[in-house]
Amino acid sequence: MRFLFVSAQLPGHLDWGGFLATAGALHGRGHAVLWASGAAVSGLVAAAGVPFAALAETGWRWPPPPPIARPEGMDDAAWHLLRAGRALDQWLDPPRVAAAVDALGAVAAAFAPDVIVSEVFMAAAGIVAEQQGVPFVVVGWPAVAAGKGPSTGPLVAAARARLEGLLAGAGVRGANFAADGPPALRSPLLHLTFWSDGWYRGLTLLPQTRHAGGLPLDALPADAALPAPDERPWVVITLGTSFNRDPAFFLAAAHAADRLGCLPILLLGRSPDEAERTGWLRQLPPSSVVRETVDLRRVLPYAAAAIHHGGAGTTHALVRAALPQIVVPHAADQIHQAQGLTRTGAGLHIPPKDVTVDRLMAALAALLPDLAPVRAHAAALRAELAALGGVPAAVAILEQVRGRV
């Protein structure tokens, strides 16, 4: 079979718990696989052994627009509409998405995929799949029945107007989008997640949702460059690779861990600049370890807890290590991981505005004891995901997708 995978041009958007790994496994089984995204992630995709096609435009705006101040005299409703519109610009800006449809359409026409597999934020992928008449699969996100939120109103109307204009310009009906309410990619065929029914407990999922879970994280010998974890329990602290410039978060988390006798391991996801090296990094506890990244297989299995942003890939890796977590969401989709952890009891959620050293200390103290309930819940969640089969199960599910639409 021929699989065309599509993602935004950010490292975190390659994961979702097993997205790129599944593409690599399909390629290893002899399928023709091509990954289309922005050139910024070409090296990561190539390192996974997956052929890559660079798109001049993906439809995902990065970097995001700078923050705006509330105009003087603007009422609450207008301010909410303005902010929501800027958030929508991230993935559904009409000129940007239209350009992405052209770029991805050319790749699809040349590659002739049997299936297009996309993360949930690639509007162009849903449009191009309909243009090409091939099955469309959303990975990393379930198909959720309409909830109790607003299905009409000025914001929804404005957002749907954007989508309707894009669909009309592309000459398609929108078969791969939700039919009403806020615009969202919705495959009528398959939504494949790397979570489980328990992770989404309380939500009404549509029948095209299937879960592949995830296999336990393979442990390698502990990172020898770090103090032994039996000397000071390791606490992993990270904001991932995208929204990772929040010194207040890193300082509060590091001091909370240090005051409880733990070793703060800060993973910045990037190299610190000179201003950081001479600024806030000097305010960290002397015990702190600061790295750009680590081999998670040498750290997570030996750690006591993690404090992080709630990125899907980070959260999934921590779950596969049965590691109790504190999530401080820093971007829109990260709240979903925080909610999953609280639903399953495998972690805690603290809003960014409530982060203090004392608040983090109290939360971390609840996670550290060996017999803490959250540890039992984390172990149960890991077992639930493992029972579903992980990436091999995802491969088997995708290999069953057949036919034209």
Image: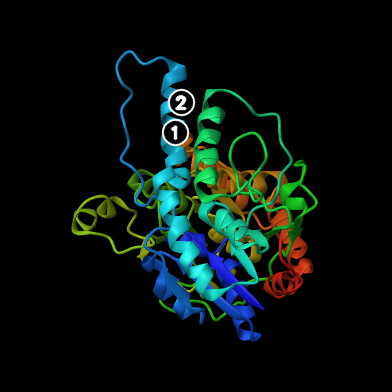
Q: Which one is in front, 130 or 144?
A: 130
In percent of width and height, residue 172 lies at 59, 49
The image position of residue 233, as x and y in percent, is: 52, 62
In the picture, the disc for residue 153 is none
- Residue 81, which numbered label? 2
Q: Secondary structure at mark 2?
A: helix
Disc 1: which residue: 85
Residue 163 is situated, as x and y percent measured from the top left of the image, at 53, 40
Q: Are marks 1 and 2 in contact (CB under 8 Å)?
A: yes
Q: Is residue 112 above or below residue 179?
A: below
Q: Position of residue 78 (x, y in %)?
A: 43, 20
Q: Quadrant of the N terminus?
A: bottom right
Q: Could you tell me which residue is drawn at 29 percent across and 16 percent down?
A: 72
Q: Residue at x 66, y 35 (%)?
A: 180
124 over 86 or under it: above or below = below
Would you say residue 105 is visible in this rendering?
Answer: yes
Q: Amino acid at mark 2?
A: Leu
Position of 137 compared to 246: left or right? right
| Residue 129 versus residue 174 in the image, above or below | below
Amino acid type of the residue that numbered disc 1 sits on in the rendered structure: Gly
